[in-house]
Image (cartoon, rainbow, N blue to C red):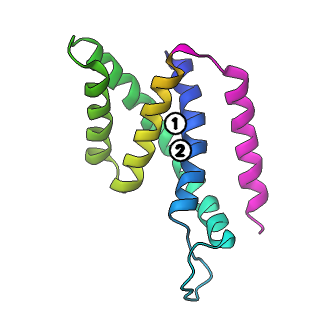
Amino acid sequence: MLSRKLQTAVFAATLSSFLMAVVFPLNTSGFEDPDRYKFVYMLSGFRIYTPFIFLGTFLFGVPVSMTADRISGRFGWYPSLLSYGLHILACTLFAGLFMVSCIVATVFFMLDRWLKEKNFPGSATALFFIMLLLWTFSIPL
């Protein structure tokens, strides 16, 4: 179960990093710009969101997901719905940025359910290092 959750964490953090950078780009230039959906602002959002999303997903999301699945597995009625509710409840109780954490938790939950029958250990490892390289080389830009 832990290996599947770690694979899901890599995929969810990657997808969430790109999603957050596109949906909520960050203008770090210090100047106001009415067009906030420029590639430069999306790249800036990607640089800032990625380490926080990865850390939060691995340190907080994986244990919460494992706990939610164990708790929901003990009940016979709607275990997936109960597990999703526990994911969102944990985000509202413990995470500071409610909207961002709920988006990441929803992506994590959906990917976890999709990956339940699949196994991509090599892909998850490669994707993790590709994201690390992308983030590292985007810092000087």
Q: Position of residue 90 (x, y in %)?
A: 29, 39
Q: Nearer the viewer, residue 90 or 43?
A: 43
Amino acid on which disc 1 is placed: Phe
Report if residue 121 lies within the magenta region: yes
Amino acid on which disc 2 is placed: Leu
Residue 51 in sight? no
Horizontal placement of 72 versus 115: left or right?
left
- Residue plotted at (43% across, 38% down): 60
Q: Quadrant of residue 86?
A: top left
Q: Position of residue 92 (x, y in %)?
A: 27, 47
Q: Nearer the viewer, residue 4 or 59?
A: 4
Q: Position of residue 118 (x, y in %)?
A: 58, 16
- Residue plotted at (34% across, 23% down): 67
Determine whether 19 is above or below 122 in the image: below
Q: In the rendered structure, which segment of residues is drawn in magenta?
A: 117-141
Which residue is under mark 2?
Answer: 55
